[in-house]
Amino acid sequence: MKTLLSITIRNSVLSKMAALLEQERAIIKTVNQQDLSNYSGADLAMEKRLIVDDAKIDSMILSLNQLTDQDDPVGVERFRFTHENGMKISNKTAAFGTILIIYESRPDVTVEAGGIAFKSGNKILLKGGKESLLSNLKIIELWHLALKDSEVATDWVEYLNYNREETQAFLEHPTQKVDLIVPRGGENLINFVKKHATCPVIVSGRGNNFVYVNKDADLDKTLAIIINGKTSNISVCNALDKVLIDANLPNWEIFAKQIINELQLFNVEVLGDEAVVQATGVKAIESDLIWYEEFLEYKIVIGTTNSDQEAIEKINKYCGGHSASIITKNDSIAQEFMENVDTAAVYHNASTRFTDGGQFGLGGELAISTDKLHQRGPIGLQHLVTNKWYIYGEGQIR
């Protein structure tokens, strides 16, 4: 394990990296255009994630500045106890050591996830996808300039330019110690990493997020939330895939048609369960297995439910454990829903698109975990630490 860098040095590297991104903005965009022109365009969501424009660079810079301003997550005392024999015992946060981040398509991860892991006192190994290689290598070049400027060894941030076979070999027989692996991408990537990894893995899992429209919903808010959740960015894990409408909602059939009409203005393919098909004439789902799917495309499924409890049970059965929202004017029903739906983030009258480290005040996230250990939901700076026990004695024996 590398010697922990002081918080002053860590912040200095992050500040320099933010300045370099601004300085090299035009070159980064030009290099990214090469990646985009080389990409086949076979996957619309992946292509969207690949794009680095001014807004994306602004977001990277903001993330680094927010990280710089946050307190050091390492060395925070979490527990203190004085033993009856006089020993003083405390538990403090500690860096993991070396973190490997494996991701698809998104060059911004090379900045944001790398920054969070670095500020947490960790050495970073980054393994991006081949479709974003040129963009990633340019960003790594800037990381190394920022490290050198602060007189820090460049191996604190390493890029692993491996193909699939080389990645598998590294996971199974690492050529250096790796303490934690975070895969960010589709289910195939996650399953690949879990199958071959020989150290702990935090899964940044699939979305498949639900909105439940309770019988007491404000319909204007509902419509806006559904349109935003589905159409504002289809390529992200917090996008909306499923809508459940309470059949006790007055004239739910008319409202379902209104939702469908609005979605179709955005060229969203709408599928329905039997009740929705009968009420609106949309195409029927072929199998209940579709309720398990995350789409990452302009596609949505709308169904009905007969009660709040039925909605909760359906969401818990099919969702990806990421995000779910209830739209209702009844606060007690909302609270019951939020306490019983088993997802990392639960919402009342808001879009699932907010499940994001930056939106939650964390300054970005390393990943959004759908596991329950060791941290659930957006993994921010303060979560990317383990802990260590410190015991101070004067010769005590047991």
Image (cartoon, rainbow, N blue to C red):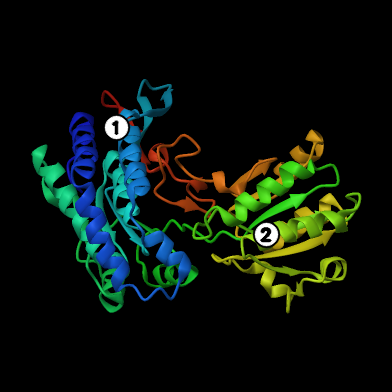
Residue 139 can be seen in this image: no
The residue sitting at 74% across, 56% down in the picture is: 259
Q: Amino acid at mark 2?
A: Leu
Q: Is residue 231 left or right of residue 210?
A: left
Which label sits on residue 263? 2
Could you say where residue 17 lies in the image, as x and y percent from the top left?
21, 41
Could you say where residue 102 lies in the image, as x and y percent from the top left?
34, 62
Q: Amino acid at mark 1?
A: Thr
Mark 1 nearby-residue class (10 Å; few <14, some 14–19, many ≥20): many
Q: Is residue 380 left or right of residue 212?
A: left
Mark 2 nearby-residue class (10 Å; few <14, some 14–19, many ≥20): many
Label 1, secondary structure: give it. Answer: helix
Could you say where residue 104 lies in the image, as x and y percent from the top left?
37, 64
The residue sitting at 40% across, 73% down in the picture is: 41
**Pointer 2 with pointer 1, Cβ within 8 A:** no
Which label sits on residue 68? 1
Where's the C terminus, which quadrant? top left
Q: Nearer the viewer, residue 21 or 220?
A: 220
Mark 2–mark 1 distance (CA, rounded to whole Å): 40 Å
Q: Is residue 2 left or right of residue 60?
A: left
Residue 142 versus residue 137 in the image, above or below: above
Residue 76 versus residue 54 in the image, above or below: above
